[in-house]
């Protein structure tokens, strides 16, 4: 069984650019959640995807968008990057059943630096 | 608004001492609460969840709805317990976690 993987590991961009981060969910999982973790803070929920549809969103502007693919992998896109977007971006996968959500498994994260 | 508060950024104890990591939450419904742990150079992982009522690695946590708390406890700290600990809330089992700011536990020899 393969765990959650994310790519790239590190990324440096400049203000105004666009970035795409990728996440491969754990085998058997159908739900992917994305979190932003600023330095010294806890992870903050960005949005969640279930069966290729957005299934809830945190307090993030529309320039944060995402996709989920038929194999349940996911992308996070951020347009018009700002300095405050510098953070660790975490992806977590889980399985959703009729009884709710099972344990979320986190990836290692992508460290984004915006200059 | 839903919120999770961990009042201590750093908790430093000696090996063998009791540990209590504090977590308070604000949520009017029935919360699901979790403790996540991140060891050095490892990814965030679930330590325990309140509905399972398990003891993991000697840690326990009891949900106190009256005090809206979910403190993490261990009677005798070990050096390998040194890590960052996050308390998290899931509203109505949506899978969307609200995390506290985290507490670094440092266990000294």
Image: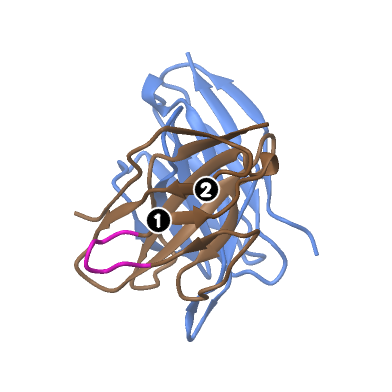
Q: Is residue B66 magenta?
A: yes
In this rendering, position of residue B77 left or right of residue B4 = right
Q: Spot the residue most to the top.
A: A115
Left or right placement of residue A33 versus residue A61 in this view? right
Question: Residue B35: horizontal and vertical position, in percent?
Answer: 49, 56
Q: Is residue B53 left or right of residue B69?
A: right
- Location of residue A11 with respect to A67 vertically, above or below: above
What color does chain B have in the rendering? brown
Q: Which residue is mark 2?
A: B18
Predominant SS along the magenta part: loop
In terms of secondary structure, where does tag 1 sit?
A: loop
Residue at the bottom extreme, as displayed? A98
Residue A113 location (% of width, % of height) = 52, 21
Quadrant assignment, res B91: bottom left
Q: Secondary structure at mark 2?
A: loop
Dot 2: few (<14), some (14–19), or many (≥20) neighbours within 10 Å? few
Residue closer to the observer: B96 or B6: B6
Chain A appears in which tint? blue
Question: Which residue is disc 1 drawn over?
Answer: B71
Q: Is residue A30 above or below residue B86?
A: below
| Percent coordinates x, y for residue A100 in the rendering | 46, 78
Q: Which residues are magenta?
A: B63-69
Question: Which of the two residues, B64 or B35, is positioned nearer the viewer here?
Answer: B64
């Amino acid at each position: 069984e393969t765990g959650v993987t994310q790519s790239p590991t590190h990324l440096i961009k400049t203000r105004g650019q666009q970035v795409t981060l990728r996440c491969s969910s754990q085998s058997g999982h159908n739900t992917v959640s994305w979190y932003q973790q600023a330095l010294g803070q806890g992870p903050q929920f960005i949005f969640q995807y279930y069966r290729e549809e957005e299934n809830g969103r945190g307090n993030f502007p529309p320039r944060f968008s995402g996709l989920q693919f038929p194999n349940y992998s996911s992308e996070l896109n951020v347009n018009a990057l700002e300095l405050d977007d510098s953070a660790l971006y975490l992806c977590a996968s889980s399985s959703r059943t009729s009884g709710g959500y099972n344990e979320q498994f986190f990836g290692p994260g992508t460290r984004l630096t915006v200059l | 608004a839903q919120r999770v508060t961990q009042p201590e950024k750093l908790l430093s104890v000696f090996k063998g001492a009791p540990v209590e990591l504090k977590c308070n939450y604000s949520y009017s419904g029935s919360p699901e609460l979790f403790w996540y742990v991140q060891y050095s150079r490892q990814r965030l992982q679930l330590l325990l969840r309140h509905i399972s009522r398990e003891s993991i690695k000697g840690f326990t946590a009891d949900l106190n709805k009256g005090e809206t708390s979910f403190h993490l406890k261990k009677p005798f700290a070990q050096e390998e317990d040194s890590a960052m600990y996050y308390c998290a809330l899931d509203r109505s089992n949506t899978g969307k976690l609200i995390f506290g700011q985290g507490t670094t536990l440092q266990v000294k020899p």
